[in-house]
Image (cartoon, rainbow, N blue to C red):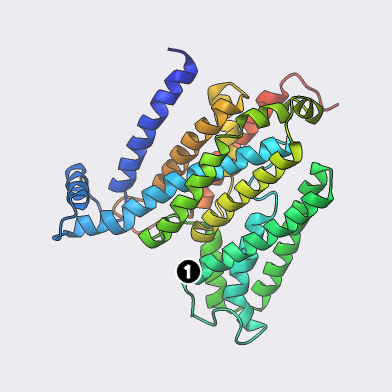
Amino acid sequence: MNRKKFLFLILPILILLAFFVELLWGSVSLSFSEVLSSLERITANSDELSTSDFIVLNFRLPKAITALVAGAGIATAGLCLQALFQNPLADTSILGINSGAGVGVALYTMSFVLVPGLGGGPGVYNVWAIAIAACVGSLAVLLIILAFVSYLKDIVSVLIIGVMIGFLASSVITILQYFSEEEALRSYLLWSFGSISGTTWEQLRLVVPVVLVALILTLGLPKYLNAIALGENYARSVGVNVKQVRVSLILITSIITGTITAFVGPIAFLGLAVPHFTRILFRTADNKILIVANMLCGSLLLLCCDIITQFPGGDLVFPINAITSIIGAPVVVIGIIKNSRGKSVF
């Protein structure tokens, strides 16, 4: 068995293992047998649920499913953007879509300070309203980016415009934060930390189908991504419509990023680090392998990061963005060093 087949065999097993640990782990200690019994009663649709059944059904199972879907989605979006821009530092925040979602949430939670009657008002925050505000912000940035894509021929210019949109969004958020009250500021900061623990079954009914459809669409892209990786002229010579592929990539990554960010907040570094981690692990640049491998690695990494954030038997939980950054930054550095070995800056 070669290395790639072995990894494709072992990764789903590790994901299943991490998924089950995620169900066991938390502020309330549950034993292995309690979780198994709870899963049996939940799947049997039993009317009599114990406390452990309630915890597994309403808190830990939605959180574990969110980690699976969000991890695969963010990692795949990062890989698509790195292929789109031919830049290993591109990730889900590079087009300003995360920033757009941040502005939407900031306007909802803090704008009432500047314009009374606008936004949620002090202490009046609805989870669905925050999600809708994030979606609207992401969509607005997406429409701006698509307008520039149809106008500009240089993809690097689109990249720079995405970065500038991020700066503009940061400025708007900073102004709102400066004038906002403590409670509004706290609500926005909690959202910006990122968390997969607050998602409900109602939210998953929207997030899972949207992200899964977008992920399935990416499975049809490897041939085009491999052609573009060899150069635009080569891609055009083999019949690839480069502009159409780029617009498709931007749409797919925007839908994935906007949907996930709306409900779990911005998850840092995952979109940047997982593609590097996958290339190092599988030792390949073939997108036919990388896209599926990236989904598996993204799900596994986000599950592991969320497990690390929690202290079993205690209420202390670290922000997930802190853990993804601690794990992701060394992975990116190792990937860049491996790719730059033998080259000299001077």
- Residue 208 or residue 9, whichever sits in front: 208
Circle 1 sits in a helix, a strand or a loop, which is it? helix
The residue located at (57%, 72%) in the rendering is: 185
Residue of label 1: 128
In the visual, does 127 lie left or right of 278?
Answer: left
The residue located at (44%, 51%) in the rendering is: 208
The type of residue carrying mark 1 is: Trp
Considering only vertical position in the picture, is 281 above or below 177? Answer: above
State the quadrant of the C terminus. Answer: top right
Where's residue 23, x and y in %?
A: 30, 47
The residue located at (19%, 54%) in the rendering is: 45
Give the residue furthest to the front.
239
Asked if residue 89 shows in the view, the reply is no
Where's residue 258, x and y in %?
A: 58, 56
Give the residue furthest to the bottom.
116
- Residue 326 or residue 74, whichever sits in front: 74
Give the residue furthest to the top.
1
* Marker count (numbered): 1
Considering only vertical position in the picture, is 333 above or below 160? Answer: above
In the visual, does 75 lie left or right of 239?
Answer: left
The residue located at (20%, 46%) in the rendering is: 31
Asked if residue 191 shows in the view, the reply is yes
- Residue 320 or residue 141, whichever sits in front: 141
State the quadrant of the N terminus. Answer: top left
Rendered image quadrant of residue 78: top right
Where's residue 93, x and y in %?
A: 65, 50
Considering only vertical position in the picture, is 255 above or below 235? Answer: below
Would you call the spot at circle 1 few (<14 residues within 10 Å), some (14-19), or many (20 or more)?
few
